Amino acid sequence: MTIEDIQNDIIDEFSMFDDWEERYQYMIDLGKTLPLIDEAYKTDNNIIKGCQSKVWVHAEMKDDKIVFTADSDAIITKGIIAILIRVFSNQHPKDIIDANTDFIDKIGLKEHLSPTRANGLVSMIKQIKMYAIAYQTQLQ
């Protein structure tokens, strides 16, 4: 699936919920399905700077695609990173670099986060794109 297809699926899933309490619960449930990051990757090098909670993201190349794993010590943040991992993992670096993140506004996520969590979300996306830039450079 393309990044855009996955984003559209997420938009459809979030539109099924009537209120933000249900959407938060859905995000928490998504966080519970996040593939576990290897404890060896829970290092300061993999912590997302700018997040109020601790969020670790690890990336590696497999078959010219980046595979991300992540974790967080906070349930909402874990749900947020789970959404981002779902969108960007197993994608080509160039596709990640070129992807827009309008789906976040379309599901209303940013406007329903505290300012510190919204900043953390931006930092997570920035770090994912930085990994993609680094891997894309290696492929050239």
Image: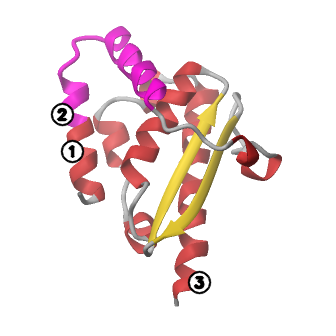
- Depth-wise, is mark 3 or mark 1 nearer the camera? 3
Magenta part of the chain? 11-33
Mark on residue 138? Answer: 3
Q: Position of residue 106 (x, y in %)?
A: 28, 37
Q: Position of residue 43 (x, y in %)?
A: 79, 46
Q: Looking at numbered disc 2 in the image, what kind of residue is underneath it? A: Asp
**Alpha carbon separation for disc pair 2 and 1:** 6 Å
Q: From the image, tell me which residue sits under label 2.
A: 12
| Residue 66 colored in magenta in the image | no
- Left or right, 27 with respect to 115, comes to left
Q: From the image, tell me which residue sits under label 1.
A: 8
| Residue placed most toward the observer, 25 or 21 | 25
Of label 2 and label 3, which has the lower sequence position?
2
| Residue placed most toward the observer, 100 or 86 | 86
Mark on residue 23? Answer: none
| Residue placed most toward the observer, 67 or 15 | 67
Q: Position of residue 78 (x, y in %)?
A: 54, 29
**Alpha carbon separation for disc pair 2 and 3:** 35 Å
Q: Looking at numbered disc 3 in the image, what kind of residue is underneath it? A: Gln
The secondary structure type at the circle numbered 3 is helix
